[in-house]
Structures are given as structure tokens and as C-alpha cells.
Amino acid sequence: MDNSFPGAHGVPLDAPAPIVPIKLPDFLALDIPPRLNLLAPIIAEKSVNMLFGPRGCGKTHLGIGMAVAVATGTRFLRWEADEPRRVLYIDGEMPTAALIERFKAATAGVANFSFAELNLSILAADYTPEGLPNLSTLEGQERFALAVEGHDLIILDNIATLCRGGKENEAESWATLQAWALGQRRAGRAVLFLHHAGKGGDQRGTSAREDIMDTVIKLSRPADYQATEGARMIVEFTKARGFMGQDSEAFEARLADGGWSERSASNARDEQIIALHLEGLTQRQIQSDVGCGVATVNRAIKAYKAGKPVADNDG
């Protein structure tokens, strides 16, 4: 017998376990519990997700708000965490002082604050000697292995700063990080990537990133956005696996001194249409400014002239 193949049937003892398919009856009989939601309905257990938008639109504010809600089992915008879960927020970009201020603001007055103290952990590149490892390498992933253990949700803010190397627009450069994300899912953890949008408004780099995602959230600025307004954004879903209907509808979110507020994106759009109409713009000019169809402009103006509240104008 060849000593280089000491295992049965000539297979080395250190060979990977064989891949064995499961017959349908056995597969259907598997006792696999259904996935629960960490932040209903958009982030499920053992899921991989992405939130992306242009620079300065409020991605980190939104990511921190989601982290606090999951850690405390509370509501954030239109989403609800049924129970407190363990969250690791990994930041690769912000100065530590600025990050502290954002977490202070996000947790001020929050219900169940004691759960935030217990369940929410932060890894900040700016506070780590030599910075954080490169998560797009196997060595970097090994160095993160101990830190991610024991958490239900890992939020990575953001891909560009934490996953350095390779060309963003090549699917091959995503392969190593994708394998890591799927490994986290198999280990029972959910992942949320924060990412930048490109010039065209889509997520920057290869679209292959979205293939494994359960939920993909796109942020954009409203057409009438003013820089003085701070974090005001349209929140829409370009991928929604496991939820639909009203849960998947776009809405407008805003962070002001009084905290977060939200309203229907269509209501916000119709208010803008009416304001431009009252300024004397034509329907074609309004269509161009708002970025919608002429039919939408015409419907909103007709509803306004008929005396219908904007809240009744969705459709």
C-alpha cells in the first residue's frame, strides 16, 4: 500500500471531508429552525446584507442607529428588534472622538440602555495600534476571528477602509471577502456591510457583491436636499429577500436635533412637486427637477387642486 495515502480508499488522512448530497426526503426532514429577525423585517439571523450611499449622506448615522436598536431590542425608524442581541460595530474610518459623539447621540434617552452597555461592542481603527487588519486577506480574517465570536450581528463600516486590496470593479477581488461573510453566516452570525455609492448612484465596484445579499439598502439624497439639512435621505431597497409589500417601500429618513423621523417617500416627493408647481414651474420642468414621470407630477397636482391631503395621494 502506498504510504503517502494512508487513509481508506487511498485518501490521505488529512484530506477534506467528502461532499455528500442529501436525498430529498432526508433533506426535507432536516430539523432546521427558521431564521428569526434581528431587526424586522430587514435583517434576519444568519444573513448577509449591504447598506450603501454617497459620501456624507448619513450611512454611519444609520448604521449606528441600527446597531443600537438590535443591541437594545428597540425600534428604529420603521424597523423593530424583538429582543436584545449582541452587536459588534467595526469602524475603519472615523476619528475616535467623532465616533464617540455619534454613539453618545444615538444612545441618549434610548430605552433599555443597560442592554446597549452589555450587548454593543466597538472596534475602531483610529483607536487600534497600527489600525485594523485587512479583512480582504486570509491573514486579516484570522486576526478578526476572536473579535467576532459571541456576536449575533457584525456591522462593517465600511468596505473601502476595512477591505483593502484588489480592484473594486473585479468580482475576483470580492471572492475572499465573500467567503468570509458566508463563513460568518454558517457560524450563526449576520453581517451588514456599509459601502459607498459610485457616481451613477449604484453601489461602487462589482455588482457581484449583491449576489449573496439578503437585503440591499440604497441611500440617496432627496431632489430638494440642502446641505444645511444634515442627514436627510431616501431609503430604498434594491434587494429584499424575505419581505415585500409595504415593508419594502421606500421612505424618507431625517436626523435632526429631535432625533430621527421618517415619512413616505411618495409623500415627500408630492410635497416637492406641489411646492414647485406653486413657484410657477411647468410640469416638464418639475419632472426634470424631481426626477419622476410626468404622470406622477400630473397626479400630484390634480390631487392638490382637489384639496386632498398629501398623505392620501400615494398610488
Image (cartoon, rainbow, N blue to C red):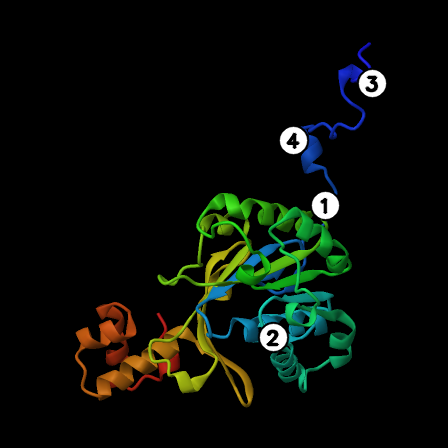
In the picture, residue 92 is in which quadrant? bottom right
Q: Is residue 107 above or below residue 66?
A: below
User: What count of labels does the image hold?
Assistant: 4
Q: Calculate the distance from the C-alpha at mark 4 to the C-alpha at mark 3.
A: 34 Å
Mark nearer the N terminus (1 vs 2): 1
Which residue position is annotated with label 4?
24
Query: Which picture quadrant has residue 279?
Result: bottom left
Residue 105 coordinates in the image, percent (x, y) = 62, 84
Contact flag, marks 1 and 2 (Cβ < 8 Å): no
Q: Residue at x 54, y 90 (%)?
A: 257
- Residue displayed at 69% across by 28% down: 20
Task: Identify which amino acid the numbered label 3 is placed on.
Answer: Pro
Residue at which label 1 appears? 32
Question: Residue beneath label 3, please?
Answer: 6
- Secondary structure beneath dot 4 equals helix
Q: Which mark is residue 261?
A: none
Percent coordinates x, y for residue 193 in the rendering: 57, 60
**The C terminus - image quarter:** bottom left
114 to the left or right of 27 = right
Quadrant housing the N terminus: top right
Residue underneath mark 2: 65
**Amino acid type, mark 2:** Gly
Q: Is residue 78 visible?
A: no
